[in-house]
Image (cartoon, rainbow, N blue to C red):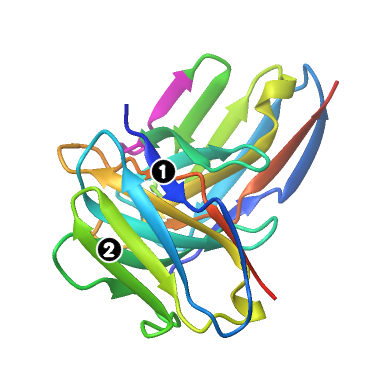
Amino acid sequence: GQQVMQIPQYQHVQEGEDFTTYCNSSTTLSNIQWYKQRPGGHPVFLIQLVKSGEVKKQKRLTFQFGEAKKNSSLHITATQTTDVGTYFCAGPVEQGTYKYIFGTGTRLKVLA
Amino acid sequence: GAVVSQHPSRVICKSGTSVKIECRSLDFQATTMFWYRQFPKKSLMLMATSNEGSKATYEQGVEKDKFLINHASLTLSTLTVTSAHPEDSSFYICSARARSSGSNEQFFGPGTRLTVL
């Protein structure tokens, strides 16, 4: 079945360092979403990428969708303690159903 | 805007009892709601898709008679865990997609932590 994997599973960085999580799908995706879940919280939508090779920025966060639309990445520049949490990518399961399969997640810990 | 609530936030019950969890979209209409299960430090596992006015569609491996879903209105979906057992203990999260939304963004509820003794 369809799988969405993320690496790394965990990442500890010093505050101010950069961080990147990679998302790989076993199938081609029509779009990809990214969510952030703070410890003890619920996932919060960050962004959706649709076009092949698309790059979007939100302040210190840069999101990229691969040319083949099977992978994506999230890069955080100069991490802050507020960036702590688990980052999930999610890809659609079926056209027209709005169902998404979530990636395995990358848990980020930022050391002050 | 786009707030989703869940009730209760935590529930502890005895084995064999049934537990109902409510998911409400507070300021928008949701034609589609999703129910997920999340184990500690793990990803979200989609259990079922709840569509207003029709039967829910369940993912493979999810027992529909065990996890009863009702989407009675455009703002409310309920998940009932019937005859709960300790292995049903988990974090259950719902999400909703806005009826008028042109995007596929899902708005998540705060989740319900179920503990079955």
Please tell me which residue is depicted at 47% across the width and 33% down the height of the picture. Answer: A64
What is the chain letter for disc 2?
B
What is the secondary structure assignment of the residue under circle 2?
strand
Instruction: State the residue in front, A56 or B49.
Output: B49
Q: Residue at x 53, y 80 (%)?
A: B17
Give x and y (percent) for residue B112. Answer: 54, 55
Chain containing the residue with disc 1: B
The Cα–Cα distance between marks 2 and 1, rounded to whole angstroms, is 16 Å
Residue B50: which disc? 2
The boundaries of the magenta stretch are A49-57
In the depicted view, which residue is nearer to us: B112 or A44? B112
Q: In the rendered view, tell whether residue A90 sits above or below residue B68.
A: above
Secondary structure found at label 1: strand
Visible residue check, residue A70: no
- Amino acid type at mark 2: Ser
Q: Quadrant of residue B79?
A: bottom left
Residue B29 in view in this figure: yes
Q: Earlier in the sequence, mark 2 or mark 1?
A: 1
The picture places residue B104, in percent across and down from the top left corner, at 28, 43
Residue labelled with disc 1: B5
